[in-house]
């Protein structure tokens, strides 16, 4: 029988350990497909972060190293400066990159570091049990904002890709979502573009992806997708936020 | 061989280039700044890269990134910066990443002062960051040694797959002395068959210190413990100065040891059999240097530019003997004189000239 659908070669054969309905799995699959289609598995070095996304290191078929809380962009800088001809990407949650790791991501972008950052934004700290993140929406209840995020106390959500897009070293910044088949397709294209940007040596690229955390949100997988669409999409600017002329010419 | 005049910090930088280090990630802080400045001038000429990071945390993590790929890499800082790097140092040690870290220390705690101080001893030798880990720590006492030990630090790091620290006071970093620029020794080092550089022609590799179960974490910790025990057995280094026949010993490292040498000579002129043991490796601490002398020693005075940190290791080394261990220290950037040290030895142990007690 002809096999028409299978696991991309960019992934190992280990089973995903994410919670049921968590869209981390979809994003993993997309990156795995991109690695395979671009034939770059053996040229790529991934940098794992801390949080649920830490499991990336087991699940992608390329070489992987670990970084500490928030430090992925700095570690990736070291890897890339040592091996400029390899593709280097980080896979970080919003808590990791937009709180403890903010300065490293901003300065890597400012330097135009030729790395790709994949930011998975589920508006919450997943692994530690659903605490408030910089990306948590106003009024959103979390373990550390039990009355809902209060703007006067904790400020408003940080639209991290928009911040990064202001830096000239960042040449490609996209904000995507994996809530519908059409958006999943767009996300894959953005990931591919980000890797191509790096391959062409153009500068820093970031793909932010809105993702669900059914466990942290206390919602069913299906309701989570609705919640993402109804609550997160209106708050965050979506689409290709920045693509310099050189990137458009790719 | 011809000697050239070098500043301590620049000798470290020059040695790094000579040792084949081509990546430096740093952040300026007095009194270590000449390391990054010198390298910013000279590293590019050797095809290397010097990157000034946004802070010390980034720089140590960049070092980790480069070390994962097997590159020789270095960073340099001073006490407050080393404090920021401690998290990354724990990470580097846990992932067994060879790298060289330079601490040109200043007086602390807090912002402190710029004068010579050895109060970073605990931070350097006892882990500093989280969890059980060790750095190999080398303490030079002259500019030539800043050069020699840095060069060797890269080999030690590669041999043991462990971060190595050069710990010197700002005094040494800023001092100028004539030195001989020696060539890189042809040491045979283990092949780096563990590095992560893209899985071309081999199966994928993953370097992480994260353990998914208590069992794997314990196995990883035991592996490190065994390695540290091996290093303890193999790498204890020290310098003896008139210690063979000594009744009394001063234990001191770095700048302090230089002053202690003068105190030893002064004592000998007065017929007091004083000697010096200068630890070169602060970790592993050279216990052997003390234990082999227990039969003859009537007292050890540990002299440090701190409130007393290394003295704990001297006491541990001599714990099973009856040799009394005393401490004398100056702080905040102040240095003792040789007369002051000799006076302390006499006051503490009351040795009579020519006879001993
Ligand atoms: S905690 Fe949330 S982000 Fe983490 S795996 Fe579960 S659903 Fe996904």
Image (spheres, rainbow, N blue to C red):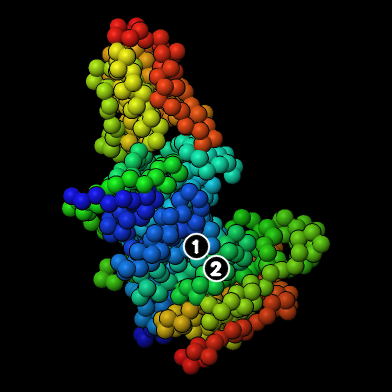
In which quadrant is the C terminus of chain B drawn? top left
Classed neighbour count for the residue bearing mark 2: other residues with Cα under 10 Å, few (<14), some (14–19), many (≥20): many
Q: Nearer the viewer, residue B354 or A80?
A: B354
Confirm whether circles 2 and 1 share one chain.
Answer: no
Q: Quick check: can you spot residue B231?
A: yes
The chain ID associated with circle 2 is: A
Q: Position of A152 compared to B252: left or right?
A: right
Q: Position of residue B137 (x, y in %)?
A: 37, 41
Could you tell me which residue is drawn at 71 percent across and 56 percent down? Answer: A143
- Total label count? 2
Where is B51 relative to B77, above or below?
A: below
The chain ID associated with circle 1 is: B
Q: Nearer the viewer, residue A14 or A204?
A: A204
Outermost residue toward the bottom? A249
Q: Position of B288 compared to A193: left or right?
A: left
Contact flag, marks 2 and 1 (Cβ < 8 Å): yes
Q: Quadrant of residue B41?
A: bottom left
Q: Position of residue A46 (x, y in %)?
A: 43, 68
Mark pair 2, 1: CA separation:
8 Å
Q: Position of B116 compared to B16: left or right?
A: right
Classed neighbour count for the residue bearing mark 1: other residues with Cα under 10 Å, few (<14), some (14–19), many (≥20): many
Q: Secondary structure at mark 2?
A: helix
Q: Secondary structure at mark 1?
A: loop
Q: Position of residue B336 (x, y in %)?
A: 46, 28
Could you tell me which residue is drawn at 18 percent across and 49 percent down? Answer: B1
Give the residue at mark 1. B53
Q: Which mark is residue A107?
A: 2
Q: Position of residue B188 (x, y in %)?
A: 18, 52
């Amino acid at each position: 029988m002809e096999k028409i659908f299978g696991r991309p070669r960019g992934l190992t054969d280990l089973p995903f350990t994410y919670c049921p309905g968590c869209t981390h799995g979809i994003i993993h699959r997309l990156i795995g497909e991109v690695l395979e289609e671009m034939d770059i598995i053996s040229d790529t070095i991934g940098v794992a972060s801390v949080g649920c996304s830490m499991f990336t290191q087991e699940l992608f078929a390329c070489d992987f190293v670990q970084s500490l809380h928030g430090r992925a962009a700095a570690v990736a800088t070291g890897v890339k400066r040592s091996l400029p001809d390899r593709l280097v990407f980080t896979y970080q949650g919003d808590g990791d990159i937009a709180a403890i790791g903010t300065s490293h991501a901003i300065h890597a972008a400012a330097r135009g570091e030729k790395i790709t950052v994949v930011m998975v934004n589920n508006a919450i700290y997943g692994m530690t049990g659903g605490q408030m993140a910089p990306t948590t929406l106003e009024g959103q209840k979390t373990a550390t904002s039990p009355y809902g995020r209060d703007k006067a106390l904790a400020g408003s959500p940080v639209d991290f890709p928009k911040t990064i897009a202001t830096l000239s070293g960042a040449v490609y910044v996209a904000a995507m979502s994996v809530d519908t088949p059409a958006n999943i397709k767009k996300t894959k294209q953005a990931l591919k573009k980000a890797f191509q940007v790096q391959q062409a040596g153009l500068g820093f690229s970031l793909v932010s992806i809105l993702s669900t955390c059914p466990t942290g949100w206390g919602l069913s997988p299906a309701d989570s997708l609705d919640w993402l669409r109804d609550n997160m999409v209106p708050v965050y600017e979506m689409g290709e936020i920045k693509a310099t002329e050189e990137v458009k010419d790719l | 061989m011809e000697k050239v005049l070098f500043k301590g910090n620049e000798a470290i930088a020059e040695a790094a280039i000579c040792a084949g280090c081509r990546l430096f990630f740093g952040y300026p802080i007095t009194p270590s700044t000449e390391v990054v400045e010198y390298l910013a001038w000279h590293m590019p000429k050797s095809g290397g890269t010097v990157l000034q990071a946004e802070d010390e945390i980034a720089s140590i993590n960049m070092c980790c990134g480069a070390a994962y790929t097997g590159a020789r890499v270095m960073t340099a800082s001073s006490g407050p910066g080393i404090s920021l790097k401690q998290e990354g140092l724990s990470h580097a040690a846990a992932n067994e990443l060879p790298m060289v870290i330079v601490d040109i220390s200043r007086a602390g705690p807090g912002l402190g002062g710029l004068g010579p101080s050895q109060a970073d001893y605990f931070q350097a030798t006892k882990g500093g960051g989280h969890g059980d880990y060790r750095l190999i720590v080398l303490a030079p006492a002259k500019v030539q040694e800043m050069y020699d030990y840095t060069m060797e630090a890269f080999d030690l790091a590669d041999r043991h797959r462990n971060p190595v620290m050069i710990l010197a006071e700002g005094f040494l970093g800023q001092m100028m002395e004539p030195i001989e620029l020696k060539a890189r020794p042809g040491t045979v080092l283990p092949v780096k068959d563990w590095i992560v550089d893209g899985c071309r022609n081999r199966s994928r590799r993953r370097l992480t210190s994260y353990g998914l179960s208590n069992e794997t974490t314990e196995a990883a910790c035991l592996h490190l413990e065994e390695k540290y025990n091996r290093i303890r057995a193999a790498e204890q280094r020290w310098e003896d100065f008139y210690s063979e026949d000594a009744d009394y010993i001063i234990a001191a490292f770095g700048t302090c040891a230089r002053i202690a040498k003068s105190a030893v000579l002064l004592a000998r002129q007065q017929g007091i059999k004083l000697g010096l043991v200068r630890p070169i490796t602060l970790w592993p601490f050279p216990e052997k240097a003390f234990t082999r002398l227990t039969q003859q020693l009537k007292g050890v005075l540990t002299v440090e530019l701190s409130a007393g940190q290394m003295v704990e290791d001297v006491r541990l080394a001599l714990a099973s003997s009856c040799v009394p261990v005393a401490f004398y220290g100056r702080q905040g950037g102040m240095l003792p004189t040789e007369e002051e040290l000799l006076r302390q030895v006499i006051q503490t142990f009351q040795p009579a000239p020519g006879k001993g007690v």
